[in-house]
Image (spheres, helix red, strand yellow):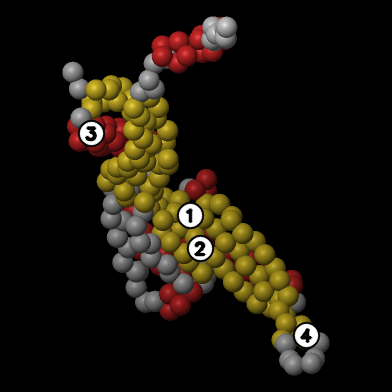
Amino acid sequence: MRRFLPLLVPPLLLTTAAAAQDRPTPPAMLTLTASADVARAPDQLRLTAGVLTNGASAADAMAANSVRMNSVLAALKAAAIALRDVQTTGLSLSPQYRYQPEQPPILTGYQARNSISIRTGKLGEAGRLVDAVIKAGANEVQGPEFTLANPDAALDEARTAAVAKARARAELYARAAGLKVKRIASISEGGAMADPGPRPLMRSAMAEAAAAPPVQPGELAMVASVTVSFELEPMP
């Protein structure tokens, strides 16, 4: 007589199968990135002015540079620019060579450069300030860069708008999928900055300009970007 043995299922397998049935289904998630910007009129500008000089010797080049830069600093003082708002950003002295084919370089002299950064809240004086430093001896000018002295309030407004935009978009996607937004699971900031738009660049050729150049501050776009993860749930 043939005997049949009962099928024995290990208790561990039974426990695992029961646990799998009891495990809750992970919630549906949606992750979106949104950005928003807030326009503000700038209240501060930065301008870089420099003096570039040449001389037969290092001492000659630097001495000539110092004379012209001191004249530029005096012009800034006359324009009521505070000393704390002027900062040296670069000072260099380098030899200059003439190169010829199959010949060693020939030293022709030295070149000195001194650059300063100027900060001011007198936006309406930007053109006259550029004109003043050029007439005083600056032969390299870059800027101006328009900024906000305190951008935090505008950036916070842009951050709030970016989160609202992300939520509105999440609700749109959720409705399209027959779901609804339950809650925000996480928020991370992708970046916040001021977008100044195009910036004029004024070069040494402006030293020949007879009048103050026109400078328009325009507006700044304070931009914030956020990435938000939403937990979704079925419609009731």
> Which residue is rendered at x = 65% and y = 77% of the image?
54
For residue 105, the mark is 4
Left or right: 121 as drawn, with respect to 170: right
Left or right: 11 as drawn, with respect to 94: left
Judged by depth in the image, the label closer to the viewer, 4 or 3, is: 3
For marks 2 and 1 on the same chain, the one whose residue lies earlier in the sequence: 2
Residues at marks 3 and 1, CA–CA distance in whole angstroms: 56 Å
The residue to which callout 1 is attached is 118
For marks 3 and 2 on the same chain, the one whose residue lies earlier in the sequence: 2
Q: Farthest right residue?
A: 104
Residue 208 sits in quarter:
bottom left
Discs 2, 1 touching: Cβ within 8 Å: yes
Residue situated in front as seen by the camera: 68 or 162: 162
- Three-letter amino acid code of the residue under disc 1: Ile
Q: Farthest front residue?
A: 1
Residues at marks 1 and 4, CA–CA distance in whole angstroms: 38 Å
Discs 1, 4 touching: Cβ within 8 Å: no
Left or right: 102 as drawn, with respect to 175: right
Kindly state the secondary structure of the residue where label 1 is placed.
strand
